[in-house]
Image (spheres, grey):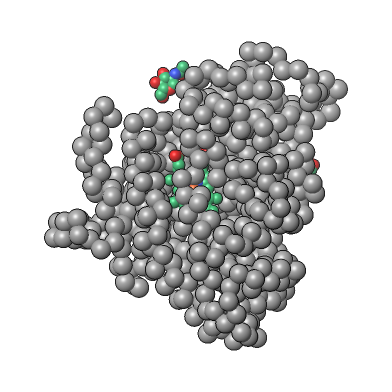
Amino acid sequence: MDVWLIILASLFACFSIKILFTLLFSSKTTKKNEPAVKGELPPGPPPLPIIGHLHLLPKSNIELRSLIFNLSQKYGPILTLRVGSKPVIFVTSYPIAHQALVKNSAIFANRPPIVPVSYVLSNKRKDIGGSPYGLTWRLLRRNLMSEALHPTGVKSYSFARKRTLETMVNSFKQCSQHEAVRLFERLHQAVFSLFILMTYGDIGEDALKEVEHIQYTFLVSYAEFSVFASWPRLGKLIYRNKWKRYTDFLRRQYDILMPYIRARQKLKQEKGKEVDLVTYTDTLLDLEISEGASNQGKLVDADVLSLSSEFINAGADTTATMFHWIMAYLVKYPRVQAKLFAEISQVVEQGAEEVKEEDLQRIPYLKAVILECLRMHPPNASLVPHTNTEDMELCGYNIPKNTTVLIGTSIIGRDPTVWENPTEFRPERMMGSSDDNSGEDVADVSSYKMLPFGAGRRMCPGYKYGTLILEYFIANLVWNFEWKAVDDVDLTEKEEFLIVMKNPVRAKVIPRIK
Ligand code: HEM
Ligand SMILES: *[C@@H]1O[C@H](CO)[C@@H](O)[C@H](O)[C@H]1NC(C)=O
Ligand SMILES: *[C@@H]1O[C@H](CO)[C@@H](O)[C@H](O)[C@H]1NC(C)=O
Ligand SMILES: *[C@@H]1O[C@H](CO)[C@@H](O)[C@H](O)[C@H]1NC(C)=O
């Protein structure tokens, strides 16, 4: 997209500067609280002919967020920008997002025909996140929730979480107490190896590293390849080298992942229903797309591949990113870390080696810390794009059917009309603060006015599982070690695939004497 932006931007530079001037300094500003005009699109800056607001759109999501934030100060919490002639709606307040996602759930659960993330990462194959609202989506999502993410499925992998934790703890025990340890690689590896195990079974250490590497490299290359989602035909012509790298990449991913899928197939043929531990891939191999859906019957190999890859990316990358942010905050704020350790000590016997999964329910402050980090750094800066299957009224405005709507999760988490001192890190604000929830309890994420996982029919199906992994790993890392800052922890954000830490956190890792 960059080259085209430059061409268009220079073509329209004079125009846009003029327009920006009138935009910034004109006296004809729309007042935020003016009653909405029925039947109109939400407000926004005046578009240019043909290109709409293309000249305003920045390259990265972090800049886009800053632009949308600035525009929302002027035009209010729901606004329109035009990409060419197509309107795209941006929502930056919780009540409006809630009205769309929850109250209008059934007509707002669709996805635009091209969701760049899915288009690029799954090579136009089936996945859950990018599927249109319909039979196939419902079947795939139900399969995920009733098997891999069902409490029984989750429980059957508790041994794997324990083993992964032990590996991670042991690797931190090897560190010298005077060393400044980079945490990211170890946290990342723990989370990815867990999800890969749940997807392909126990494939051995080297294979695990190879799968982790190919999946992670793909995610990090997403920005480079996303041009093929925005301008599919033109992109191929202009960026021949990039296109070649992209197709090479897909082939390499196929060559690496496919043998593990074949191995599960073989195992199932040999053992029938007797496999010890059901993996996500096994459930996909069993799946029958029912009558009425576009292509019924068994999933083809390439679809199994893209769905299993989605499971690893959607689950592990988000969870690992959060894990890194939360540890950074615990290093930066020793007060919070000490309070968390004190709470864990109330629940776990002295001398115990492990905080067990059953104990987690009794550590409300742990939940509060995680929620506060999710509020301030949701890994997805905005939800996966939604679109409406019917005309819809939102906040008095008309949203015509098939409009792309982006919901700004991270702006919502820092909305000063909802959160007092939104940039301050204060987990206590999550304790017993929601209306129906008194005392020391911390409720589910859905009872707070934020949307790190979305809401409604498209809400993240993995939010409970992601939270469980974070609680279990973090409780145990804090129980086993004290994490001491070596330098000022820099909380600057960077866009990779998700919103990650620009400067990875380093800490001294000091075993606690028990
Ligand atoms: C801290 C961890 C996580 C965060 C912050 C997160 C966040 C999100 C968000 C923002 C969405 C988009 C919701 C929407 O479009 O309205 C989403 C969707 C999704 N997530 Fe997660 N997620 C996390 C963990 C997981 C895990 C562990 C899984 C399990 C494999 C998972 C699987 C998915 C899938 C399949 C979708 C697509 C759902 C659909 O379109 O129907 N996520 N997640
Ligand atoms: C938003 O406004 C701030 C402060 O006025 C400015 O520094 C920033 O560059 C603006 N962002 C964009 C993308 O226009
Ligand atoms: C956001 O979250 C989901 C996983 O839960 C993921 O599939 C999706 O691709 C993410 N990333 C972006 C940039 O939207
Ligand atoms: C909305 O999108 C669907 C699927 O892409 C298409 O079949 C339909 O014609 C579109 N409707 C309008 C009003 O554009």
Query: Does residue 460 appear in the picture of this structure?
Result: yes
Residue at 54%, 83% (x, y): give it. Answer: 173
Which residue is at the far left? 270
Spot occupied by residue 85 in the image (x, y as percentages of width and height): 56, 22
Total marks shown come to 0
Which residue is at the far right? 27
Q: Is residue 297 above or below residue 307?
A: above
Spot occupied by residue 151 in the image (x, y as percentages of width and height): 41, 53
Residue nearer the viewer, 126 or 467:
467
Spot occupied by residue 65 in the image (x, y as percentages of width and height): 66, 42
User: Considering the image in quadrants, where does the C terminus appear?
Assistant: bottom right
Residue nearer the viewer, 226 or 368:
368
Is residue 251 rendered to the left or right of residue 121? left
Residue nearer the viewer, 207 or 170:
170
Residue at 57%, 67% (x, y): give it. Answer: 474
Query: Does residue 49 appear in the picture of this structure?
Result: no
Q: Is residue 385 above or below residue 121?
A: above
Residue at 36%, 67% (x, y): give it. Answer: 208
Residue nearer the viewer, 252 or 372:
372
Is residue 155 rendered to the left or right of residue 69? left
Is residue 222 rendered to the left or right of residue 414? left
Is residue 259 rendered to the left or right of residue 419? left
Residue at 66%, 68% (x, y): give it. Answer: 343
Spot occupied by residue 167 in the image (x, y as percentages of width and height): 45, 76
